[in-house]
Image (tube, grey):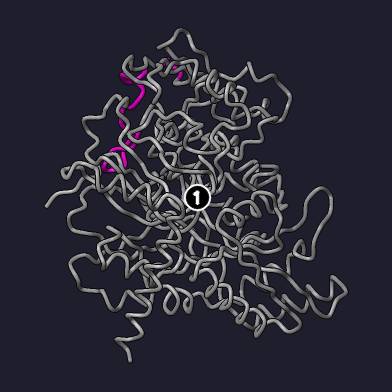
Amino acid sequence: MQWNKRFLLFVLGLILFMTACGDTGDKQEKESSSSNKDEKVVKISAPGEIPGIDPVMADNDFSFNVINQINEGLYRLDKEGKPQLAIAAKEPEVSKDKKVYTFKLREDALWSDGSPVTAHDFEYAWKKVVDPKTGAAYGPQLEEIVLNATEILKGDKPVDDLGIEAVDDHTLKVTLENGVPFFKELLTTATFFPQPQEYIEEQGDKYATDSDHALYNGPFVLDDWTGTGMSWTYKKNENYWDKEAVNVDRIEVNVVKDAETAVNLYQNGQLDRVNLTSDNVEHFQGEDEFHTFLTGSTSYIKMNQGKDGETTDLANLHIRKAMNMAINKEVIVEELLGNGSVVAHGNVPKGLAEDPVTGEDFREQNGDLVEYNVEKAKEHWKKGLEELGKEKLEFTLTSSDSDFAKSLSENLKYQLENTLSGLTINLRPLTPKASIAANVGQDYEMIITGWSGDYQDPLTYLNLFITNSPGNHTGYSDETYDKLVLGSKSELATKPKERWDALLKAEQLLIEESAVLIPLYQNGTAYLQNDKVKDFITYQVSADNYKWMDIKE
């Protein structure tokens, strides 16, 4: 009977896989049969549709991961996660006060249509990011760093006052408010990538809506992506300045949401890498192709306190603290995940950054900012209901519609309802794309989401929750918190220990004192990878890097 069940799952998996390929299946089959036998092709899966590929408007890890394969900026992370020169031809000239950087760009850097990547492309893109009319979620990345970005984002200064200037086609001058220790790392992220203004304006509303209406300057170009399709391909970019370093010809991606299906496809040779759920980990542990990795991604529940002057019941601090203390995260990590994830009692992950004086890890130093305590949870719940004048509350918990997300939602519902009397949790599973849209639009009451940092600094996790940040989406606003976080990018930028202490205090305010989030876990990844696949580069923070991926017997 067990064999029959597995065989049935395998057959169903193949059906789902073929369905996911949609109308592109026949096309891919024809391409495969006619392609050179020596062609190097890697096959991977994705959890859902691509939310978007516009570097300026990207607001989620999935989009950033895609963008990092098809575009790049002045720097790119190397295999060890250190910034290396990319579109910048050499290290910049830096003024004595560390505020003015003058970059010379590669003259052989081209867009996928053969046109040159110029300093004007960087100036156009950065100004677009901070323009209030754009509404870029990552506009605050430039805040208190690039000259006048803060005032421009607030609408107090014109966009042209931003501290960036295309001196000529291949000379770019950047002026900073303050020198920051992670500036190079910041320049490896998609928010700081160039954009071809003339092409974008020609495309109008069609720009970046599918693979045919975008230009690329990275190792790969995107192919066969319809904007909503369940499959796409990364093809080697023949106009990439460093194309000799790109080893594979194609990376074929198909959306496979069912974990069992993905494993079956891997075992059948139709996928070269697959992430494992707790159901599969024990079975594959010890095998040569089994691997684990602790990422810098943290998962948490965001609670909507209100927007546009309207507050919700989640604006009550006691209610938020009650739910923070009512969840046993060990159950989630050990029974639902089992992939190397660890319980999170804060927002900043462990292994990210060290005290500039003592070398102590940020997470270890700041400790557990929330605890699992049923009695205290009930006390806060009672006080919250009294302050609201209610005997019961009902909230909807939004999540993605993956198998794991559904299991996690059901577990959270069970724990919260069984601990907090009078609480009802309704579940709202959405596609990954719709879930991201609900988060960004603050169209939720509670939502399971998370964050994977962009650079090796606590700021990349704490910067999201300053007042009116396009990445906040919670209704949280605290002047002290804003001062601490923004200060770490301005007057404290050159005072390492004071800056460190300010970031420690900011996280304490966010989690321990204000309970803005319910931290759940720091994500581990257990996966199977074909031994033939080499240099599939992942980092604790930042998007994956497929540039050097190769296939070797």
Q: Give how far across and how far down residue 134 sits, in percent.
A: 66, 31
> Is 283 covered by the magenta stretch?
no
For label 1, count other residues whose C-alpha is less than 10 Å away and answer few (under 14), some (14-19) or many (20+).
some
Q: Give how far across and how far down residue 477 sits, in percent.
A: 72, 49
Query: In the displayed image of the protein, which residue is found farthest to the top?
Result: 168
Q: Is residue 83 left or right of residue 512?
A: left
Query: In the displayed image of the protein, which residue is found farthest to the left?
Result: 553
What is the magenta range? 76-97
Residue drawn at the location 69% of the way across and 81% of the way down: 420
Q: Residue 492: in sight, yes or no?
A: no
Residue drawn at the location 39% of the way across and 44% of the way down: 356
> Can you identify the residue that label 1 sits on?
229
Q: Give how far across and how far down residue 447 sits, in percent.
A: 63, 62
Work out whether residue 326 or residue 356 is closer to the camera in this orientation and state it: 326
Residue drawn at the location 54% of the way across and 29% of the way down: 145
Which quarter of the figure has residue 197?
top right
Q: Amino acid at mark 1?
A: Gly
> Is 83 covered by the magenta stretch?
yes
Q: Give how far across and how far down residue 71 sits, in percent.
A: 41, 33
Q: Residue 496: in sight, yes or no?
A: yes
Magenta stretch, overall SS: loop
Q: Secondary structure at mark 1?
A: loop
Q: Is residue 155 left or right of residue 38?
A: right
Q: Is residue 257 left or right of residue 393?
A: left
Quadrant in which the N terminus appears: bottom left
Work out whether residue 234 or residue 503 is closer to the camera in this orientation and state it: 234
Query: In the displayed image of the protein, which residue is found farthest to the right?
Result: 389
Residue drawn at the location 62% of the way across and 22% of the way down: 148
